Image (tube, rainbow, N blue to C red):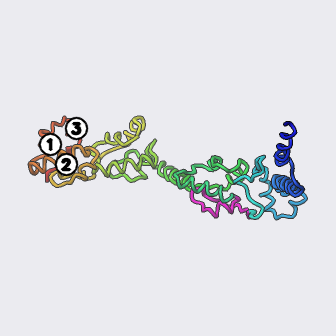
């Protein structure tokens, strides 16, 4: 019985562990190809880092080769996604550029790969901004060495514009404007005030337009985000004179016109329109306080900005 089992198992045993000459040759060839493929990336880097070969290239390409250590390949032998291939060595140029506006082509001319340049473009499209040259170091896929090479050539226009605004403020400073009429002042006059920059200047002027004019210096303290410490600092330099306050006729104004006013807003605007539709026009602005039970402070706040004729 034992001999029979041995005879039956022998062919199966050979089918698993025996290979023909052709199969052995194919296996050796396959292993050789795997070895060559895994060695190619290392031979590639050695080729471009070897001084004997680097003398063959132009100065621009030599500079690109110096950055080769930053474009290393993983042990698996696959190329790094941010590296350049031997077929498209970049022609590196050095010129001033703004990363907030530079095109894909301009970024590639500076030595960035297409993928690296695309990362910058996508960063901008998603709302990202470069505030200073050092921000180039924050971009994923750009090595510290490459970022260091690019940083001296970065000139951000927003910083230049901020410098122009600062220069205008300095030009205005010698005049030492003692008072600013908040109803007639332009942006440059607001910029002359201590602690008031372009952002607060824009907010003050927008608030003035939505109100229809100021009736008191204290209204400046209501500007969104303005610290009380800054208001107290500029208050001695402010005055409220001239300028005709724009009034809203509550008998004619629509819901949007009433609701956009900072002191009326949409909840009160809806009540005004509803009353007018049910009872007709208002005979006087005091009617509002009677029918809507408004406290004196709220009513007196928007009283100067409404009319019935």
SS class of the residue under badge 2?
strand
Residue bounds of the magenta highlight: 90-111
Is 248 situated above or below 290? Answer: below
Using residue 87 as the reference point, say whether residue 164 is left or right of it: left
Residue 146 % position (x, y): 71, 52
SS class of the residue under badge 1?
helix
For image coordinates 90% across by 56% down, the residue present is 21
Q: Earlier in the sequence, mark 3 or mark 1?
A: 1
For image coordinates 40% across by 40% down, the residue present is 226
Mark 2 → mark 3, Cα distance in angstroms: 13 Å
- Quadrant position of the C terminus in the picture: bottom left
SS class of the residue under badge 3?
helix
Using residue 140 as the reference point, say whether residue 221 is left or right of it: left
* Front residue of 123 and 34: 34
For image coordinates 32% across by 49% down, the residue present is 208
Q: Are the residues flagged by discs 2 and 1 in contact, CB closer than 8 Å? A: yes
The secondary structure that most of the magenta stretch takes on is loop
Q: Earlier in the sequence, mark 2 or mark 1?
A: 1
Residue where numbered disc 1 is placed: 288
Q: Residues within 10 Å of mark 1 (few under 14, many from 20)?
A: some
Residue 175 % position (x, y): 45, 49
Badge number at residue 306 = 2
Q: Earlier in the sequence, mark 2 or mark 3?
A: 3
Q: Residues within 10 Å of mark 3 (few under 14, many from 20)?
A: few
Residue 110 % position (x, y): 69, 60
To which quarter of the image does residue 93 belong? Answer: bottom right
Badge number at residue 298 = 3
* Front residue of 175 and 132: 132
Q: Are the residues flagged by discs 3 and 1 in contact, CB closer than 8 Å? A: no
To which quarter of the image does residue 44 belong? Answer: bottom right
Q: Is residue 69 visible?
A: yes
For image coordinates 60% across by 56% down, the residue present is 99
């Amino acid at each position: 019985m034992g001999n029979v089992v041995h005879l039956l198992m022998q062919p199966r045993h050979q089918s698993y562990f025996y290979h023909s000459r052709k199969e052995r040759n194919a296996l050796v060839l396959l292993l050789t190809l795997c070895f060559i493929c895994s060695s190619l990336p290392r031979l590639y880097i050695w080729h471009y880092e070897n001084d004997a070969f680097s003398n063959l290239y132009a100065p621009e390409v030599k500079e690109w080769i110096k950055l080769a250590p930053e474009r290393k390949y993983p042990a698996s032998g696959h190329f790094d996604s941010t590296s350049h291939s031997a077929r498209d060595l970049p022609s590196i140029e050095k010129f001033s550029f703004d990363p907030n506006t530079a095109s894909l082509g301009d970024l590639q001319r500076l030595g960035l790969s297409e993928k690296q340049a695309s990362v910058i473009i996508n960063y901008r499209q998603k709302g990202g901004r470069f505030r200073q040259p050092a921000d180039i170091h924050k971009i994923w896929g750009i090595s510290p060495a490459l970022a260091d090479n690019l940083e001296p050539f970065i000139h951000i226009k927003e910083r230049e514009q901020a410098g122009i605004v600062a220069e205008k403020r300095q030009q205005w400073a010698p005049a030492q404007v003692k008072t600013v009429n908040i109803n007639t002042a332009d942006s440059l006059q607001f910029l002359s005030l201590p602690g008031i920059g372009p952002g607060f200047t824009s907010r003050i002027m927008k608030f003035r337009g939505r109100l229809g004019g100021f009736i008191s210096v204290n209204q400046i303290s209501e500007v969104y985000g303005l610290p009380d410490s800054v208001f107290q600092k500029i208050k001695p330099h402010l005055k409220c004179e001239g300028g005709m306050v724009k009034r809203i006729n509550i008998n004619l104004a629509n819901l949007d016109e009433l609701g956009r006013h900072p002191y009326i807003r949409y909840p009160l605007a809806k009540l005004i329109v509803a009353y007018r539709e049910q009872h007709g026009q208002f005979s006087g602005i005091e009617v509002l306080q009677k029918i809507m039970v408004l406290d004196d402070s709220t009513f007196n706040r928007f009283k100067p900005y409404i009319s019935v004729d």
